[in-house]
Amino acid sequence: MKKRLSCLSGFCLLLLLLPQHELLAQAKVVTGKVMLGKGIPAEGASILYNGSAPGTTTGADGGFRLNVPSLTGSLLISYQGYLPEKIALKNRSYIEVELRISEVDLDSVVVVGYGTQKRRELTAAVSSIKGDDIKNQPVQSIADALQGRISGVEVTKATGEPGSSSQIVIRGVSSLYQTQPL
């Protein structure tokens, strides 16, 4: 009987200690803000713990909240057009970081209607106008500045009124189903 009572009390002691062990194993929460400089919040920046999923993204105010297993790892913060930052947590639960602009050679990148491509990878015709070519022109809009400068692009105005909208047609009458491409 005494042996049974001893076994039962040991089992009860184990049950009391088990919930405390679960509390110690719970995830920690890291919060913070990601800024782009001059107080501009980085909405949609990606944040990963130790560079692997699951992660989170920042809200409209640049703020984030991420559950992590430990405050001893690091956060990898990335945002398009900016250099990624790797921040060691060092037992901190609040992080503020300002991302730096990534210096990219813009002459080698071409923005197209559905993404970006390097100029050497393009298979279609590309026309471009330098800003200096139209900088001192007496025009009221970008559409007016393009008129007569790029082959295959037709710019017309519905009325002769100053400030009226222009219609841009690229490569003939079936230009993107007659929508305004620009």
Image: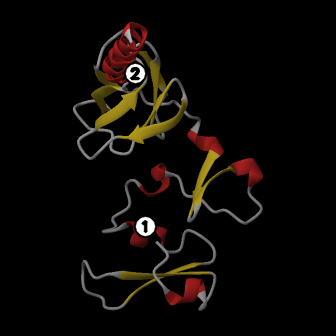
Which quadrant holds the N terminus?
A: top left
1 and 2 marks in contact (CB < 8 Å): no
- Toward the front, the furthest residue is 1
Whether residue 52 is situated above or below residue 175 in the rendered picture:
above
Residue 124 in the image: state x and y as whole percent.
74, 65
Mark 2, residue position: 25
Callout 1: helix, strand or loop? Answer: helix
Which image quarter: residue 65?
top left
- The amino acid on which the numbered mark 2 sits, given as a three-letter code, is Ala
Closest to the observer, 103 or 72: 72
Whether residue 37 is situated above or below residue 123 in the rendered picture:
above
Which image quarter: residue 134?
bottom left
The residue shown at (40%, 21%) is: 25
Residue 135 in the image: state x and y as whole percent.
40, 53
Q: CA distance from mark 1 to mark 2?
A: 64 Å
Mark 2 crowdedness (10 Å alpha carbons): few <14, some 14-19, many ≥20: few
Closest to the observer, 94 or 162: 94
Whether residue 118 is situated above or below residue 50 in the rendered picture:
below
Mark 1, residue position: 145
- Left or right of 61 on screen, residue 130: right
Mark sitting on residue 44: none
- The amino acid on which the numbered mark 1 sits, given as a three-letter code, is Ala
Residue 40 in the image: state x and y as whole percent.
25, 37
Mark 1 crowdedness (10 Å alpha carbons): few <14, some 14-19, many ≥20: some
